[in-house]
Image: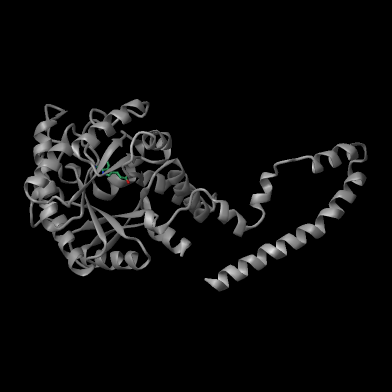
Amino acid sequence: MTEVLADSSKALFNEGLSHGASEAPELLEAPELFPETTEKLELLTTSLPQRPRRLRRTETLRRLVRETNLQISDLIYPLFVMEGENQKIEIASMPGCYRYTLDLLLGEIQQAYELGIGAIALFPLISETQKDNAGTESSNPQGLIPRTVQAIKQTIPEILVITDVALDPYSSEGHDGIVEDGKILNDETVAVLVKQALTQAAAGTDFVAPSDMMDGRIGAIRKALDAAGWINVGILAYSAKYASGYYGPFRDALDSAPKFGDKQTYQMDSGNSREALKEIELDIAEGADILMVKPALAYLDIIWRIKQCTNLPIAAYNVSGEYAMIKAAAAQGWIDEKQVILETLTSMKRAGADLILTYFAKEVALILQ
Ligand code: PBG
C-alpha cells in the first residue's frame, strides 16, 4: 500500500513538474499561430476562477475525486445450470456464457468466489418433458435447482445464493404463470410460486427472487416463508420489471420463450415510470428486502427515480440483451469491450443502483483486480 501511494504521489509530482515546464512555451507560441487573437488568449488564461480540468490532470487525482466507484462486491453473477455431467455449452447469443452441469458449475462458482464475487443468481434449463402448464417441476424438492443449491452450500458455503422464483423455465407455455384460455392467471400462479419459494428455502437458498410480476406474490411468499420458520430467507423483488426485447438471449439460454403472445399483461410497459413507484411501494409494504429494476440500461431513469423514494437497497439487472450488444460490437472490433463494460456498469451505480446482476461479473472482477 505504501509503495502504491509512494508511486502515485511521485507520478503526481512529475506530472506537476512537466506541466509547469510546458506552460510557458505554449503561451509564447500562441501569438505566432493566431497573431490577431493574442490579447484575448492571454486574458482568458488568467481570469478563470474555476478550472475543472485541474481535477482531471492525473489518474491519482481523478481517482481521488471520483464520485462513483464500481466494486467487485457490488456484483451478482447470474448462472445457468442444466442436468448431466461434465458439460458446458456456450449460449450462442451470449458468447462467454454457458449452461453448466452441476459438477462444472461448482468449479465456475469457486473461481468466481476466489475472484471476489460474493453472490450468484441461479437459472435452470428444464427439459421439455418436465414442463407443464402449472410449472409443477418448480416445487420438486429433488429438482435441479434444490439439488444445485444444496451442492453449492456444501462446497462453497460462504457464497450468497439467490434463486429465481417464476414459472417460465418450467412452463410448457413459456410463460411466468399458469395459462387459461390464453390468459395468465394471477392468484393461482401465486400459490405455485409460494411452493417454489418454500422448496428453495428448504434447499438452503439465501434469497428468493420473484421475477414473475404477478400481483401480491411478494406478500404471499413473505408470509409463507415466515410461517415455515424461514425468517432469514430474504426476498430480492423484481419490482419494476419491464416487458422488454432485451431478454431475448436469456430465453435462448433456457429455451423459455413464450409459446404464444408476449408478457405484456404482467411485465411493465416501457413508457411508464410512475407505475414503477407504485410497484415498489407495494413490494416494500409486502416485505421485499431488495428492489430490482430490470432491464437496467434503458431504465436508468427508473433506478434514479426509485432511489429518491426508498431507503432499501436497489439492484439493477444488466440483462442478457445488454450483454449481447456489447459482446457483438466488441467482436466486430467496433468498441473497446473493457472500457464499455466498466462505463455501462458505472452508469447503473451512478443512477443509484447499489448492486448489479451482470454476466460480466467475472470479467469485471479480473479488470478491477
Ligand atoms: C423470467 C426471467 C427472465 C429474465 C430473468 N428472469 C426473462 C423473461 O422475463 O422473459 C431475463 C434475464 C436476462 O435477460 O438476462 N422470469
Judging from the image, the colouring scheme is one colour
| The image quarter in which residue 22 lies | bottom right
Ligand 1: image quarter: top left
- Near-viewer residue (291 or 162): 291
Count of number-bearing discs: 0
Q: Quadrant of residue 224?
A: top left
Q: Nearer the viewer, residue 123 or 307?
A: 307
Regarding residue 298, the answer to whether it shows in the image is yes
Q: Is residue 330 above or below residue 366?
A: above
| Residue 324 screen position, x and y as percent | 40, 48
- Farthest residue, direction front: 49
Residue at point 79% right, 58% down? 20
Q: Residue furthest bottom?
A: 3
Q: Position of residue 220 (x, y in %)?
A: 12, 38
Is residue 301 found left or right of 206 in the rendered image? Answer: right
Q: Nearer the viewer, residue 99 or 279?
A: 279
| Residue at x 42%, y 40% (from the top left corner) | 297
Q: Is residue 207 shown above or below 104? A: above
- In the drawing, does residue 338 fall left or right of residue 15? left
Taking the spot 11% from the left edge, 42% from the top edge, the residue there is: 194
Residue 328 x/y as whole percent: 45, 49
Question: Which of 188 and 14 lies nearest the eye of the viewer?
Answer: 14
Evaluate whether residue 135 shows in this view.
no
Based on the displayed image, in which of its 4 quarters is residue 172 positioned?
top left
Which residue does the image show at 33% across and 37% down from the upper left?
310
- Residue 9 spot, x, y in % from top left: 64, 66
Depicted 332 relative to depicted 171: above or below: below
